[in-house]
Structures are given as C-alpha cells and as structure tokens.
Image (cartoon, rainbow, N blue to C red):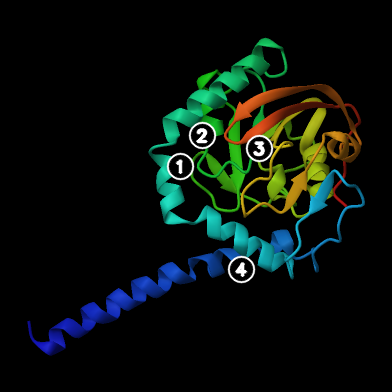
Amino acid sequence: MKPNQSKPLIISKYFVLSLFFSLPFLLLLSLRPYYHRFSSPPTDIPTPDLKIRPGYTSYEHYIKKQLNKTLDPKLRKIWTTRDWDRKIQVFSRFFDGLKREGLISTESKALCIGARVGQEVEALKKIGVSDSIGMDLVPYPPLVVEGDFHNQPFGNNSFDFEFSNVFDHALYPERFVAEIERTLKPGGICVLHVALSRQTDKYSANDLYSVKPLEALFRSSTVVRVGKIDGFGLDTEIVFRKTANIIQRS
C-alpha cells in the first residue's frame, strides 16, 4: 500500500477513537437539564444511619463517575451476556412474590429505576407486567429510557409500581425519594432493595445502616413491610405504599 493511501485510514482510526472517548462528555452535556439545579454536593445528612460519601466536588463530577460505571464496556458486556439470564431469573422470583402478595398486577404500570440494560424490566414482563419501563443515565432501547433519578422525566402520578436497587447511588437521597413519591400514583407501591450490613461498591454515593432514614424520607408513604433478601449484594427489601395525593415537582 502506498503512503498516501494509508493516511485516510489512520485519520479514520483516530476519529473513531476520539469519538469513543468523548462519549461520556457528550452524555454529560445531554443530561444538563437533569442536573443543573444541583449547584453543589449536599452536606452530610444529620443522622448516623445515612451518610453521604465525601469527595464529590460538584454534581457534574458525580454524574461523570456514575457514567464511568454505566459505560464501562466490560461491565456492559457482562450485563448483557453472562449476567442476563441469571438476573432475570432472580428478579422474576422477587417480582412474582410481590404479585402473589397483591402488591403488583398485570395491570400495573411499572418503572425500574437505575435499570442499566433492563433485566428488571424483562423480569416484570416475564410475569405478565407488560407496561414496564426502565430508566438510567444511559438509555438501552427499548427497555430503558434516559433519565436521572434525582429528576425523573415523568409526570406526577405516572406509575402504579416503582422498583430500585440503586438507592446507594443517590447523592441526594431526599430528592431520590421525593421523585419516586411524585411520580407514583396514590396507593402505588415502591420497592427498594438496599444493603444494611455491608458497604456497597466504589460508585455508591451514600451508606445506609438502618431502614429508619428511609422511613423518614418517604413522607407521603407508609411502610408495608421490611424483609431480608439475597439480591446481588443487597440484603434488605423495604416496601412502601404511597398514601398522599399528587406530589408536585419543587
């Protein structure tokens, strides 16, 4: 091959590489409507049972760190291959138990918060809850739409059921909960899977040591039950029912 023929190939290669490495930054810009209201990281919540991890200099810094995990090609490959069937099977078992309790039905409109590639959504569909969608910083069509759980892109009273196992990733726990209560219909159910007996991964933004802070944060809901689980490093399931009327976005 002549030198002048290889030059376009080299330019194309560097263009593709630069595009790949700039993807997190482009996604960060696309999320600006979600995080602009958070001008600074929160101070530590005044309770010994819920602590915000230090080190976040801004909300942009926090989002960038979360995107580092969500966009990690090795993790995404694991989530969509090796872990796919296993997680759907486990989530289906959890959701089927909730269905038998009457906490979710085939008529429910459901949201999975922090769903990444949507195994939770697939599990809900598997037990007959067809009107289900996931939400994460990075979309994964058709199962997961783009959104920040601190500022959900949905209207008031949108869902009958909301599930999340990423409470530990919330930099603003009070905002995380407020958005669930805003988008949940009166009488709707929220289920959280959390870790109380151990710290979660390095991408977590808070550490929870009891259910008391959650009970306090869910101001418009009552606790249905608390139980032990074994769910991908998480050990506790808390079920809430929304009791108050529409929660307006502040």
Question: Mark 3 highlights which residue?
Answer: 165
Q: Mark 4 or 2, which is nearer the eye?
A: 2
Q: CA distance from mark 4 to mark 1?
A: 25 Å
N-terminal label among 1 and 3? 1
| 4 and 2 marks in contact (CB < 8 Å) | no
Q: Are marks 3 and 4 in contact (CB under 8 Å)?
A: no
The image quadrant of residue 211 is top right
Query: Is mark 2 in CB contact (under 8 Å) with mark 1?
Result: yes
Q: Nearer the viewer, residue 182 or 77?
A: 77
Q: Which residue is mark 1?
A: 79
What label does residue 29 carry, if any?
Answer: 4
Residue at the extreme top: 100
Q: Is residue 52 above or below residue 93?
A: below
Q: Is residue 188 left or right of residue 229?
A: right
User: Residue 229 location in percent, x, y?
Assistant: 66, 25
Q: Which mark is residue 119?
A: 2
Q: Amino acid at mark 3?
A: Asn
